[in-house]
Structures are given as C-alpha cells and as structure tokens.
Image (cartoon, rainbow, N blue to C red):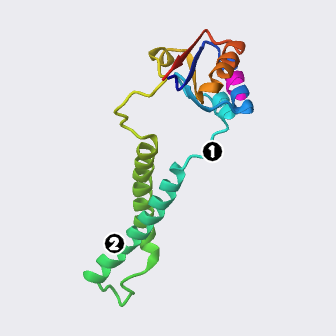
Amino acid sequence: MKQGMLGAFRELDATCLAIEELKKKKVGEVTVFTPTPRHEIEHAMKSPMSKVRQFTLIGALSGCVFGYWIAIWTSEYWPLVVGGKAISTWIPYTIFGFEVMVLVGGLSTVAGFFILSRIPRLTMTVGYDPRFSHGDYGVWVKCAPEQLKTAEEILRRNGAVEVRGEG
C-alpha cells in the first residue's frame, strides 16, 4: 500500500506553489528535499521556530553560572589576601563567566542541532532520491490512501517533472 506521493521539480517557484497548494488543501504531511536551504521554501512550509535556540539559551546561562561559581570557589578554597581586599568579588570574574558562557552555549547549540536533526540517521528517509542533492527539488506528501489522487493532481498541475507513489 502506498504511503504517499513524491513529486520531483526542477524549478523553485513551481515547488513553492505546489507546497502552498498542498498545505492549503490539507492533503497530508509535506516533506521537502532541497539541494540547498532556500528561504522561499521555508516561507511556503510555514515552519515553526527552531528549538535549537532553547538549547543555546540554557547552555549559555548554565555556562555563565558555572563560570562565576568555579572562579569564586577557587578563590575561596585557595585565598590570596592582598592588601586587605575582599577575596571574592564579581567584577574580575565577569570575564571568566563570559568565556565559559560562550563555550558551553556554543557546545549546547551543536548538541541541540544534532539531537533535533536526529543525526546520524541510520535509515534512509522515505521519498528521498539522490537527484535532490544535485539540483532538483522533491516534495513528499504523506497522506491517506484516499488523498493520493488529489496529491498527484496537485503535484502534476504545479509542474512536477515526475510524480510517483511510494511507501
């Protein structure tokens, strides 16, 4: 039994029109394969904001707190009393807190990217064709069996050079 329809496009505009029509008619879940990221496709897909930035924020705040904590803890554990000044003050530790914030925030961003992208992907994605890495655009529509004909018509009407059912 077929799970969906795959349409191969050579033109970016035709791909965007097909995506918009599929979304408008609510045929099914749409997945797009592109050789390079394009803002036109992102606009047509109306994707939600990426959750990677939450990883960055949490990692950066954690790194900043850890940077201050480790610097203050080190000063308290091995005190160097110079001229009766306070052992722990926040001003000189701001640089260290900032550096650790950037380090942990950057590493958290990379980790979030890999986690949310599910990399490495051990199985091939349904609907993927190697030509989508060489210049063509692919639109995979996962839909119910009764919606397959509608999806095929929309893909052909919008200029797909090849349409085939896969599953």
Assess disc 1: are there few (<14), some (14-19) or many (≥20) residues with their C-alpha within 10 Å of its C-alpha. few
Q: Earlier in the sequence, mark 2 or mark 1?
A: 1
Label of residue 70 in the image: 2
Label of residue 48 in the image: 1
Question: Which residue corresponds to the image point at 41% horizontal and 41% vertical from the top-left?
Answer: 118
123 w.r.t. 74: above or below: above
Question: Which residue corresponds to the image point at 36% horizontal and 90% vertical from the top-left?
Answer: 84
Q: What stretch is highlighted in magenta?
A: 16-20
Label of residue 37 in the image: none
87 w.r.t. 146: above or below: below
- Left or right: 134, with 66 as reference point: right
Quick one: SS at disc 1? loop
Please, what is the three-letter code of the amino acid marked with disc 2?
Ile
User: Is residue 135 on the magenta stretch?
Assistant: no
- Left or right: 26, with 9 as reference point: right
Q: Position of residue 36 (x, y in %)?
A: 54, 25
Please, what is the three-letter code of the amino acid marked with disc 1?
Pro
Q: Is residue 95 visible?
A: no
